[in-house]
Amino acid sequence: MDAVCLLPPTEGDGGLAPWMDNWNPGDRIYYSFPMSHGAGILMDVVIPALYSLQCILGPPSVLLDLGLLEARADHANIDIWSMVPSLAVELGEHLDVLSKFKPSKFICASGGK
């Protein structure tokens, strides 16, 4: 994962930069998988360490839902979002909440089906 930012442009890439191209030291990342999951460890510990990011966790014992994402968008100044697909779908169905994500650099759905 740390080598992704080192990938040079390649013939036929259509100018598409690596997905971490605009991540900067100090950017804030929120990943919806728990730390008890392998992907949670990767995105909450390893990636922030490799890219000097600030990882936003929790809050503990609070069910992850659209309301929590909206509160994070309102108050946590998150630059990078990675969420479970069901939340990404729900976010796309609520344009009023989705508009709050406009300042973000990167939003993706990961995991699941």
Image (cartoon, rainbow, N blue to C red):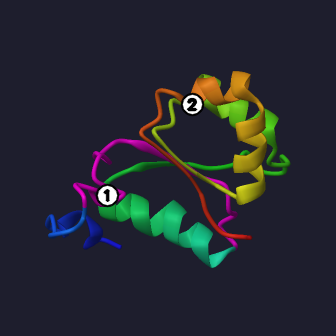
The label shown at residue 51 is 1
Q: Is residue 85 above or below residue 66?
A: below
Q: Residues within 10 Å of mark 1 (few under 14, many from 20)?
A: some
Image quarter where the C terminus lies is bottom right
In the displayed structure, 85 sits above or below 59; it is below
Secondary structure of the residue carrying numbered label 2: helix
Residue type at mark 2 is Phe
Magenta stretch: includes residue 68: no
Instruction: Report x, y in % for residue 8.
Output: 14, 67
The overriding secondary structure of the stretch rendered in magenta is loop
According to the picture, the residue beneath numbered tag 2 turns out to be: 101
Q: How many marks?
A: 2
Q: Report the mark closest to the observer, 2 or 1.
A: 2
Find out whether residue 32 is within the magenta segment: yes
In the displayed structure image, the side of residue 91 where residue 48 appears, left or right? left
Q: Quadrant of residue 18?
A: bottom left
Q: Which residues are magenta?
A: 14-36
User: Which residue occupies the foreground of this view, 90 or 57?
Assistant: 90
